[in-house]
Image (spheres, rainbow, N blue to C red):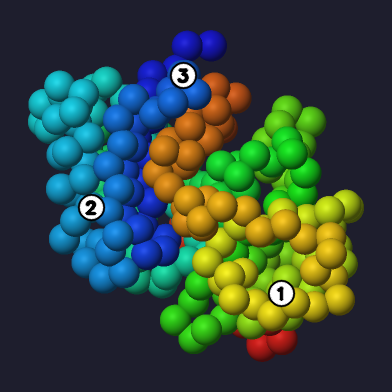
Amino acid sequence: MSVLPVLGIDTSADYCSVAVAGPGPQPLAEWRVWAPRGHSELLHQGIAAVFSDLGWEPATGGRRLGAIGVTTGPGSFTGLRIGIAAAKGLALAWGLPMVGVSPLAAMATRAGIAGGPVAAAISTRSRDCFAALFVAGTQGEPCQLGEVLAERPAAARARLAALAPGPLRLCGRPWRGVEAGPETDCLRLLAEDLDDPCAATVAMMAWQAMARGEGQSPEAVLPVYVRRSGTA
């Protein structure tokens, strides 16, 4: 099945990023800026920059796309709302389907899920983290084991290490600086350039979902919010 390239958007954490990808392994164009604040001001600039790199006119670039992929959470409450609202607006204007992508799954995919279990984590404003464990599915896709945790990084790391079916690799800023624990011998902290979600991976995952016929209507794509573990 032939699928047009996909626009990917990530505003789930401290980077604001946009990319167009598919069908090759590398993004066709990518824009990414560190922005703990200001996603709303920067996001459309990023989309315009990516279209410009591809030689697409802003008014007609949507005709060259097959879908829009966007991170749906968990992540920054405000960032998620900004990214999803922008993606929905563009999808409705251009008549495109959407694909919602977990930023944690995107991080695990970028880390190389085929190499073994990956625990991905994103920081919260309250010094907790959102974290989840992923393994490779039958087609190499990230499959989540257990629930998304929302708690202190040390506690989350211990719980995910106990759940992992083998040595565990860690990606995400929350894992850095966590003191050694009894499970440390079976852990490996991955490179810092894998610490954050990125739109290039989101776009590629969305493209693959579209190739499997898994596109959704914009109305069906909703933010995913996770409460702190142990709360009602």
Q: Which residue is mark 1?
A: 156
Q: Residue furthest top?
A: 1
Image position of 164 with respect to 29: above or below: below
For the point 39% across and 29% down, the residue is: 27
Label 1: which secondary element = helix
Q: Position of residue 141 (x, y in %)?
A: 68, 36
Q: Earlier in the sequence, mark 2 or mark 1?
A: 2
Q: Which residue is mark 3?
A: 23
Cα separation, mark 2 vs mark 1, equals 31 Å
Q: Earlier in the sequence, mark 3 or mark 2?
A: 3
Please state which of residues 82 and 37 is positioned toward the viewer in this rendering: 37
Residue 226 falls in image quadrant: bottom right
Answer yes or no: is residue 226 visible: no
Quadrant where the C terminus lies? bottom right
Give the total number of marks visible in the rendering.
Answer: 3
For the point 73% across and 28% down, the residue is: 139
The disc labelled 3 sits on which kind of residue? Pro
For the point 69% across and 41% down, the residue is: 113
Locate residue 35 relative to residue 135 in the image: left or right: left
Cα separation, mark 3 vs mark 1, equals 35 Å
The disc labelled 2 sits on which kind of residue? Leu
Q: Which residue is mark 2?
A: 43
Label 2: which secondary element = helix
Callout 1 environment at 10 Å: few (<14), some (14 to 19), or many (20+)? many
For the point 40% across and 44% down, the residue is: 199
Q: Which mark is residue 124?
A: none
Q: Earlier in the sequence, mark 3 or mark 1?
A: 3
